[in-house]
Image (cartoon, helix red, strand yellow):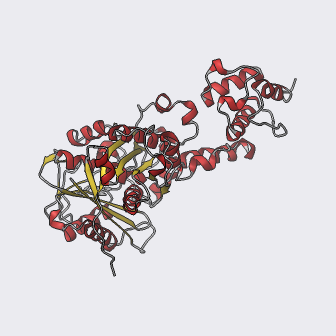
Amino acid sequence: MTARQEPFSAAVTGLGLVTAAGVGAKATWHSVTQETVPGGVSHQAELADLPCDFMYTIPDLDTTELLGVATQRLMDRFSQLAVIAAREALADAGLDPESWDSSRVAVVIGSAHGGLPFYDQQHVAMAGRGARRVSPKLAPLTVVNSAASSVCMDIGAQGPSMGVATACSSGTVALGTAHQLLRAGVCDIALAGGAESVLSRLLIASACQMKAVSTRRDDPAAACRPFDAGRDGFVVGEGAGLLVLERPEHASARRAPVRAHIRGYGASSDAYAAVAPDPEGNGIERALRIALADAQVQGRDVGHVNAHGTSTVVNDRVEATVLRRVLGDHPLVTSTKAMTGHALGAAGGIETALTVLALEQQLVPPTANFEVPDPRIPIDIVRTEARQAAFDCAVKTSLGFGGHNAALVLTR
Amino acid sequence: MNAAEVVNTLLVQRFGVPPADITDETALRSLRLDSLALEELRVLIEERLDIDLDEVSLTPRNTVGQLVAAVDGNVPA
């Protein structure tokens, strides 16, 4: 049986984005709405000769300049991206760490792989030069929760904090968890989303063996093509996306502009396979229906979906079928991954921030690289250019390896 | 590069210590080096000079000068 309670609308008051489509929420939004050729994807020396030798990265981001050596040395790159996004989100929300009740500030950040690159480097050090050359920082830099603890230290947040690890739905589950913490009243402010940076030869070599990633080596900019008939796998990207959420009375008491609300959250597990989604999509359907019920909205109320849309053959077909079954054929669906890459555990954070912007601007970003419709995709994919539309309610869906499904319902 | 130069360079480049803050009498903890940072510094010095500091006891209360002397004592003449 389902315990029904009144919907809880967490106020979104700040956004922070660091993605391969742009540094800053404004730059990323500009790219995903105004451009249709991704500029952030390129061949990587680290991946030379692999069947997938390209990735979405943020090469011009000077983390040392932004963070300083003393702060940066205690973080692997995914945590650095999280801290940079957190600072932007806080500034955007007009929150001042000098004046808030820091014990009421929570931090919840998802990541699939955490500090895998540092783990990888230290393994090389041990194999080549012995145990006495291994860094003592392995555990603190590589654990998935280190993005959350790094952000806590940087902004002085002293409420509950945690990492969330549900593979590619981590960012969305982190936001849903923050929604629940706010609803339960254990914090007034939550900084939540996801962070990922895995330019790792080891990981991508394995993803190639799994046949999960695109092998369109001759044209990386065209490789990630969500929902397109010619899609052949996802393309990994690095990035971070964090949102400032507040209890609504906290936001209104300080007269903070509210950019949108997170009103419903649903999560489920396929209990089916280590990698493949349930072929009927029952798991993501359940998560979506729970989120709609939590928000007390109907499928017909949903005007826009920022889909998981990874550009794998199976994900896109299963997800599209479920969106059609649950919501109908009217919502304007997009996948922004062709512009950002698949940022794995950060994806849900980045894409929920983009969904907030879509609600605010009443503008749905196009699905870059979507050229040839797949007859098995029964939904309205926004293509070619951004589409202006009137909608008060939007949905973000995420699916993760291991069968971790999550959905958020956002309202204006 | 002698021990003092190696230590100073690492403190500046790898730990973000302002060069002007480094004197022989400065305690390592006042340069924001905690016990984890000292263990990291130990590995970096060993790597850079190809020496073994395993027997050297280091705490954040030690000064830069004491650290340099301990490194010097382990550098083969």
Residue B52: image location, x then y, percent: 81, 36
Q: Is A103 above or below relative to A399? A: above
Residue B7: image location, x then y, percent: 72, 25
**Horizontal relation, residue A410 to residue A245: left or right:** left
Question: Can residue A322 be seen from the camera position used here?
Answer: yes
Which residue is situated farthest in the bottom direction here? A1
Residue A218: image location, x then y, percent: 34, 43
Which residue is situated farthest in the top direction here? B20
State the residue at coordinates (60%, 48%).
A140
**Horizontal relation, residue A131 to residue A277: left or right:** right
Q: Is A294 above or below relative to B75? A: below
Quarter of image, res B3 = top right
Question: Can residue A328 be seen from the camera position used here?
Answer: no
Q: Nearer the viewer, residue A217 or A138?
A: A138
Q: Nearer the viewer, residue A198 or A233?
A: A198
**Horizontal relation, residue A271 to residue A249: left or right:** right
Q: Is A112 above or below relative to A219? A: below
Residue A105: image location, x then y, percent: 44, 49
Q: Nearer the viewer, residue A1 or B3?
A: A1
| Quadrant (top left/top right/bottom left/bottom right) for the N terminus of chain A | bottom left
